[in-house]
Image (spheres, coloured by chain):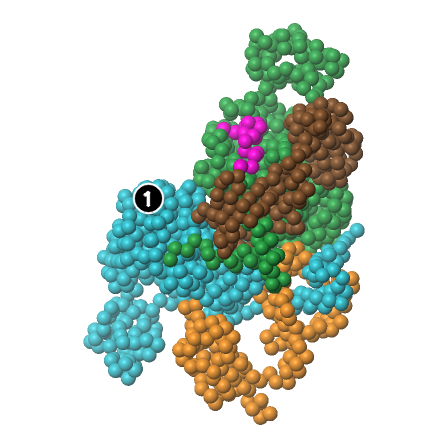
Chain colours: A brown, B green, C cyan, D orange
């Protein structure tokens, strides 16, 4: 069976064969033998090619969260639309508020050219200031807030578009 | 001894104080904001009272209301924990005015050490070393001789300055005069004021602090140092005791100095004298924290002294239960602050719900946490979830145990720094004790989640997806969830050899 | 050092060994029976293999199969834990034959100490005191002089006896001859054999044991004593170290004797020499356990020595990392065995599912448990759920901490001895250290659940009932369970003061 | 509202007034003010007359289990039949197997008179022997097993009837 998972902007494709509870999985030309044994409500043992990995899993709707070795991975089940949009246009970075807070300073204005990793905006929440950075090279095409604004979780802040997508 | 103590705090430190009280046979009263209705500290206290809205300024910071609760519930002591009102001299004073003991130093001591200038003056008078430098403006004619006296590397800073303007780091005498000129001209153009001062620049500084504790009979004892150099956002994240960078001799000198400083202000209770130290063990006073410190457990682990119980006892008038000569370092302890934050994204806090958690157990592991399944991290308070503390017979033993304990820790539902901490325990420079406050910046690779973890997680993810899809097509019993399905089926076929 | 160790056990001790291996950088292989498919020890090891049916005789006791797994997975060591194959000389021998180290003493040492008669003889030759008595039949003509030698109180027992028949407890010489006659005639009529033997009767005996550990270079060190007098069904339930009934002098003598005994059999690894002791500190050899003991953690807590790591290291050929003069007692430790059993019903095991559990945390608390939500207690194995261990700076401190920790422990779904242990920590005679193996029989009131607890529980019960009924009538959202309902509603109205 | 709970052979009667989430409860002529705050899946704070008690609760069907201070209390919701039978005939003690195991020895035969606390049967499970005792004075009226039998959880073993009920 074919399955896809989306993490961030990446799409992962799997081919899974269910052999009565043990799974043969192919991803990215690698092959795995895996099993999943339930321990507790969210706690699992995954036996991967004979080695035991402790994993915690939660699934809600179309999102699957996996905790492994201290890190949390949030996967989503991509929709058909997701798949095509992911493949075509990856040239837009829409920055939204990572938590409710206050805009300390907008660093870039509309039309300004920015490089990957450059700071776009400083927000403050939980007594800490964070600089949000561009993940692509491009130009600022939208600024939705101004200094001092209070924003809710997920509120759009600033958008950068890649140069290529400008030309398209 | 106290009969009933009000704990004027929340989270793990409130729980810590409640545990100490329980072990001392003292009743406890918790206070809580609207956001903390179902917190563990509320559940563990004998009584609990709502004191207002979720913002600290609406609840935990309103001393007046807290004192009202203490009076109404007939408490004879208030323990402030850390943060909130713990270093508020006025609150300490008001407790006493209302005939309730403030469990900590006197309002006077808090005031003196809380003021940057006064505390420096007291430190100077107690012969505590300060970072060498001119406190005031440097005149051109004296600059060279001052620079010689201070030594290199040194920093020239604009008196009116900020933001790096008019600032110059100078490594050797031959560069000094030129740098001074440039700094002054930069300061002039930036602030219209060319006054500058000079300070020794501490390269690769370590954060070292001495735990002290005093009683009302005038005894003050130090409990050795803690190293807290692993910091992000200028906040500590990993602490250890003793420091791998402090020699026995320096330890003694630092300890004696800290005790002298505490005695200058007749210090009662637990306090911490913070120093900045260079890699050659030259150390300089930073400030004194007049309260119990987040990282106090590591000192408890290596000395066997229960700092929170001891501060309650001395506040009640008992003499310290030990003398300086009785305290010894036994083994090594490390604390990791487990926080809801994203190391890959500049350690930005990650509010949300910890839907499933599992805490490590076994030998040498202590978990001071406020977590439970369903615990909510809000934007109102610090995103610290737990303090994981381990003890080992030596530093290497403690690091391996911390690695093992971190590996057992599970927090599902929000991003935490657990993965980063996991990787830190295997980082060569950490293991060899080469620490300074710039450590994390120098080891950015620790912030990245490993590719193999993503790979393994994605496999678990796709099996989950498959099980969900599979159970949807073959569903008979509505309670036969994908989870049960996976557990029931695959457990049977697990590696069987016979 | 070993590369990979197979852990030939289950439950908390398997987890204990896996943790030690992780901290030593050794890979682990778990084995499990069908009943243990989703146990924690299976989850925590690097690899896991099913070795058969749920009965120990179908799985954990089949040494042959375990060795097969060890060979297939290329293990260089096997750790047997306690119970199962841990004192099976043949298994130890077979491991060695297959070039896999058995982590424990030699098969020879296991054999010698495992046999009751041989071990008594070795003990005698090592001048270890035995309970004074005639080993064989007592003839009438020598009886009086033997009785005088043994001293009073003494016990006359039928050689062919059992079940109390032909048994007489004699408190003084003047009763002796008459009692002897009666015992003999009773023995004659019960067993058609009037042979009797005489033994010193130990009044209010305490169970004291010495932890020893030896390496392959011939070094043996003792790690002081543990007191395990609190027993039910002749099994330990609460242990502590050091013993409140053992003086410094007795401790030294007992320790020396235990070391001598261990040296007699060239003992390698962790072992325990068990004694019975009267209230005047006279002690007599019972037996030697040639394996790690359930209660080893309390010794770890007071000495700072990791016994399990140390036994792995010495088995790999390393010398002991300490000498006798290096080990010291630091503070006091207590262990409670938390079991699925019903104290009100003669401590009968209570199989079932632990639907919800919560483990205590904070300073000085160690939980070695195999519990999780949904953990099943079956009739196949011991009903022990967890070992709760605390450390305190002295005995009183440790007892109060244990009381606090027990109070935090939650196991919902099956009856446990938690309530009994809770009450024990507040029992005057326990607090004053007046212990003997008959303690629980003398304090039967500790077995009863208090009326107030029933009262409080019934109130929670009726609210639950009400909420369920209430939500049934007012139900709108199917996911709006009674529980959510209670939480949402009442949390708002909790004691508000302003 | 009136509620009843059954624990063992006892029936507890309550009068509960719900004042919008705080409860006034009367039982056995005592009055209580109580609230229940949920913490975790099964964990609750009960505030009883101002004092906080930590309590764990599980409810399945008609049975409610409460964990408090180390002890476990199993309550049942009594049926109407329960109520009348509890009130009328408390004179029968039906002993059943407390866990799967083996019968070591039946100590009393049919017709034998036994006193409260006297041993009736010895069973073995988990390597331990337990003597099951009569909870009433009476006569053995039924013996359902013999020495050496293996029994499942809940299997009837032996029944004692009180002398009074003999006369009824």
* Quarter in which the C terminus of chain A is drawn: top right
Q: Position of residue D51 (x, y in %)?
A: 68, 59
Which residue is outermost to the bottom? D167
**Number of disc labels:** 1
Judging by the rendered image, the residue that carries numbered circle 1 is C316
Task: Give SS at disc 1.
Answer: loop
Residue at point 77% right, 30% down?
Answer: A143
Foreground pick, A154 / D94: A154
Foreground pick, B80 / C413: C413
Q: Is residue C322 visible?
A: no
Residue at point 78% right, 62% down?
Answer: D20
- Tell whether C403 sits left or right of B289: left
Q: Position of residue B225 (x, y in %)?
A: 53, 34
Q: Is residue B368 above or below residue D14?
A: above
Q: Position of residue C124 (x, y in %)?
A: 25, 59
Q: Chain of mark 1?
A: C
Quadrant hosting residue C234 = bottom left
Q: Residues within 10 Å of mark 1 (few under 14, many from 20)?
A: some
Q: Was residue C220 drawn as part of the magenta stretch in this picture?
A: no
Q: Is residue D64 visible?
A: yes
Residue at point 50% right, 55% down?
Answer: A21
Q: Position of residue A136 (x, y in %)?
A: 66, 28
Q: Was residue B439 drawn as part of the magenta stretch in this picture?
A: yes
Please report the bounds of the magenta region as a residue range: B434-451
Q: Is residue C410 above or below residue B20?
A: below
- Tell whether D85 sits left or right of A43: right
Foreground pick, D116 / A48: A48
Residue at point 61% right, 46% down?
Answer: A65
């Amino acid at each position: 069976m074919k399955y896809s998972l989306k993490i961030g902007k990446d799409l992962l494709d799997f081919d899974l064969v269910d052999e009565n509870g043990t799974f043969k999985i192919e991803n990215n030309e690698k092959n795995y033998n895996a099993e999943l044994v339930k321990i507790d409500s969210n706690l699992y043992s995954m036996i991967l090619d004979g080695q035991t990995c402790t994993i915690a899993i939660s699934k809600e709707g179309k999102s699957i969260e996996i905790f492994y070795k201290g890190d949390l991975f949030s996967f989503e089940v991509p929709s058909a639309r997701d798949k095509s949009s992911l493949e075509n246009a990856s040239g837009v970075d829409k920055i939204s508020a990572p938590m409710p807070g206050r805009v300390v300073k907008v660093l870039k204005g509309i039309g300004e050219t920015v490089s990957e990793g450059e700071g776009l905006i400083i927000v403050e929440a939980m007594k800490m200031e964070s600089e949000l950075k561009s993940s692509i090279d491009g130009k600022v095409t939208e600024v939705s807030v101004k200094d001092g604004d209070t924003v809710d979780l997920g509120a759009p802040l600033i958008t950068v578009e890649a140069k290529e997508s400008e030309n398209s | 001894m106290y009969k009933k103590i009000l704990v004027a705090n929340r989270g793990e430190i409130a729980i810590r104080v409640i545990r100490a009280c329980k072990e001392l046979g003292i009743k406890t009263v918790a206070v809580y904001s609207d956001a903390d209705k179902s917190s563990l500290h509320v559940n563990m206290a004998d009584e609990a009272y709502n004191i207002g809205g979720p913002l600290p300024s609406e609840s935990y910071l309103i001393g007046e209301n807290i004192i009202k609760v203490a009076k109404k519930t007939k408490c004879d002591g208030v323990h402030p924990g850390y943060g909130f009102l713990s270093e508020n001299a006025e609150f300490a004073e008001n407790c006493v005015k209302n005939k309730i003991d403030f469990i900590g130093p006197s309002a006077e001591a808090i005031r003196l050490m809380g003021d940057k200038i006064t505390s420096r003056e007291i430190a100077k008078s107690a012969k505590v070393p300060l970072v060498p430098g001119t406190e005031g403006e440097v005149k051109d004619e004296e600059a060279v001789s001052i620079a010689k006296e201070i030594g290199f590397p040194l920093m020239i800073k604009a008196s009116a300055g900020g933001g790096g303007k008019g600032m110059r780091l100078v490594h050797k005498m031959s560069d000094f005069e030129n740098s001074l000129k440039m700094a002054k001209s930069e300061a002039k153009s930036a602030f219209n004021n060319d006054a500058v001062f000079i300070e020794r620049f501490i390269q690769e500084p370590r954060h070292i602090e001495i735990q002290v504790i005093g009683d009302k009979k005038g005894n003050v004892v130090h409990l050795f140092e803690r190293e807290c150099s692993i910091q992000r956002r200028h906040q500590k994240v990993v602490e250890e005791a003793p420091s791998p960078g402090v020699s026995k001799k320096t330890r003694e000198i630092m300890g004696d100095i800290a005790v002298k400083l505490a005695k200058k202000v007749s210090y009662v209770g637990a306090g911490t004298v913070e120093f900045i130290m260079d890699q050659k063990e030259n150390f300089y006073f930073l400030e004194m924290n007049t309260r119990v410190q987040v990282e106090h457990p590591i000192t408890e682990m290596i000395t066997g002294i229960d700092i929170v119980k001891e501060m309650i006892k001395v506040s009640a008038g008992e003499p310290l239960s030990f003398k300086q000569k009785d305290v010894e370092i036994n083994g090594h302890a490390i604390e990791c602050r487990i926080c809801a934050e994203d190391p890959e994204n500049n350690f930005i806090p990650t509010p949300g719900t910890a839907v499933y958690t599992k805490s490590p157990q076994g030998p040498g592991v202590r978990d001071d946490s406020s977590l439970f399944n369903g615990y909510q991290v809000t934007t109102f308070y610090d995103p610290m979830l737990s303090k994981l503390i381990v003890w080992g017979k030596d530093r290497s033993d403690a690091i391996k145990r911390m690695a093992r304990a971190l590996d057992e820790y599970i927090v599902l539902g929000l991003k935490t720094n657990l993965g980063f901490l996991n990787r830190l325990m295997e980082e060569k420079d950490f293991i060899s004790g080469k620490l300074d406050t710039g450590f994390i910046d120098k080891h950015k690779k620790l912030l990245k989640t490993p590719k193999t973890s993503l790979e393994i997680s994605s496999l678990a993810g796709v099996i989950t997806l498959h099980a969900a899809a599979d159970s949807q097509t073959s569903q008979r019993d509505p309670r036969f969830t994908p989870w049960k399905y996976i557990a029931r089926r695959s457990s049977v076929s697990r590696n069987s050899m016979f």
